[in-house]
Structures are given as structure tokens and as C-alpha cells.
Amino acid sequence: MVIAIGFPYDMPSLPVVGFVGGLDIKCGAHTFITSHFRADCKLSPGQGGGPFLNSRGEVVGIAIASHGENQSYGLPINAAMKVCTDIIQGGKPQHGWVGLSVSERRIIPGLPGLNEWQVFIQQVYSNTPAADAGFHDQDVLLQICTNEIHRSADVLNTMFYHHCGEKISFTVLRKGQRQEVTLIVGTRPPAEQLVVLPTQPLPFIREDNPPPPAVPASTK
């Protein structure tokens, strides 16, 4: 259970009680920079930015957006604290950049030792930490540091908490072999400076399961 404390325009603060329904990385066509929790709290204009409280009165998130008739999204408090730390230390939120665009594909179920989904590198941008580290298109991402990667959302959720200048390691599957790739997180450049390295057509394990669109590289 969560309680959203909103501040509608020209009205006193208003508590709205609801329940968390799940964690989402997308809302319609919009992709969040990290997963937000979805709650059945109806928020009105002006109530964004207020806190979500749990039953013990602890702040567990910040109200970000409303969706539909009675759904709202909250930024989890650990993500909000990361943004807060960025602002205190650097004066603004940091947008870490590695220079990869990833996508995911469903693999044939039942194969031993394989997950149902694979996250693979679709594009490598030139003159970025990923290009300098030697990432290849079609590398399958297995881990970032100690976090296992099963879906594209795992990449966004993991990278969100790493700071610019931080050294991190990736475990990839390349031509059937596990490899470690290390890079230093950079700062996201302006979009017009991005150049995509040439890539080969991507083979998909099942033709009847076309891949979803790639997660925009600008979100990592």
C-alpha cells in the first residue's frame, strides 16, 4: 500500500491511497530512464513531485506522472536519492554514457543453460567508451558488474546508478565464449555528435518472433 501526498493547484494537500501494481520501464511509447513503480492512485494536475509513503510513513518514491483513469507512476526513492547526490556533487543530474544501443530477442525455450530472453548489442557508437573498450555488435550481454542481464530494462536499471567516470565491467557472450569487457562511463554527448559504427544484419533465432525496437542509446 502507498499513500500519495499531492498538492493540487490552489487547494490544500490531498492524500490518495492506492496499491503498487508493478514496475514498468515503459509507459505507452515513452521509455523511462529507469524502472518506475505503477500504483492505482489517481493524481490531479499539480500533484506531480509529491511523495509516495508506505504504511510506516517512509518516503518510497516521488510522483512523476499519471496514466489513464487511476494509474500513476513514481520514481523509486533510491533512484531519487541518486539524482539528489548528482545535484549535490555536480550541480545537475548525471547522464552516464557508454555508447551502446541494445535490443532483446526471445530464444527457443527449453535449451539447457539459456534464459528465455537475450539482450544483445545492436549498435556501437564510434568515439565512445564502448567503442574504445572493443564491444562488438551481436555481443550478448550477460552481466554488468554483478547484476545479471535478462531484459533490456535490466541494462537501463543497472546503468542508471553508475556515475560518470566510474570503471565498470561487462560480461558478454561472443561467439560462444564468455568475455570480460571493462570501460569507464562517459558523459552523454549532444545527439548530433553521435556516429553509428557499421553493423551486419542481425540473425534472430526465430523468424516468427521479430525483435522489438531497440532501446534508445540516449537513455543509457
Image (cartoon, rainbow, N blue to C red):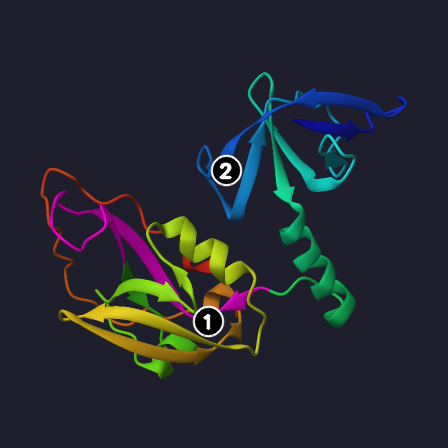
Tell me the residue at 71%/33% (across/down).
54
Q: Residue extending furthest bottom? A: 132
How many numbered discs, if any? 2
Tell me the residue at 58%/73% (across/down).
164
Label 1 – label 2 distance at C-alpha: 33 Å
Tell me the residue at 79%/28% (across/down).
6
Nearer to the camera, 48 or 1: 1
Give the magenta part as a residue range. 95-119
Please determine whether, in this image, residue 97 is positioned above or below residue 81.
below
Please determine whether, in this image, residue 106 is positioned above or below residue 87.
above
**Residue on which the image places disc 2:** 23
Instruction: Assess disc 2: are there few (<14), some (14-19) or many (≥20) residues with their C-alpha within 10 Å of its C-alpha.
Output: some
Tag 1: amino acid: Gln
Q: Is residue 130 magenta?
A: no
Query: In which image quadrant can residue 51 be found?
Result: top right
Q: Measuring from the top left, give residue 187's x and y in whole percent.
A: 55, 72
Q: Secondary structure at mark 1?
A: helix
Query: In which image quadrant can residue 149 be found?
Result: bottom left
Identify the mark at residue 193; answer none if there is no mark: 1
Identify the mark at residue 178; answer none if there is no mark: none
Q: Is residue 117 magenta?
A: yes
Q: Measuring from the top left, give residue 204's x and y in whole percent.
A: 13, 51
Tag 2: amino acid: Leu
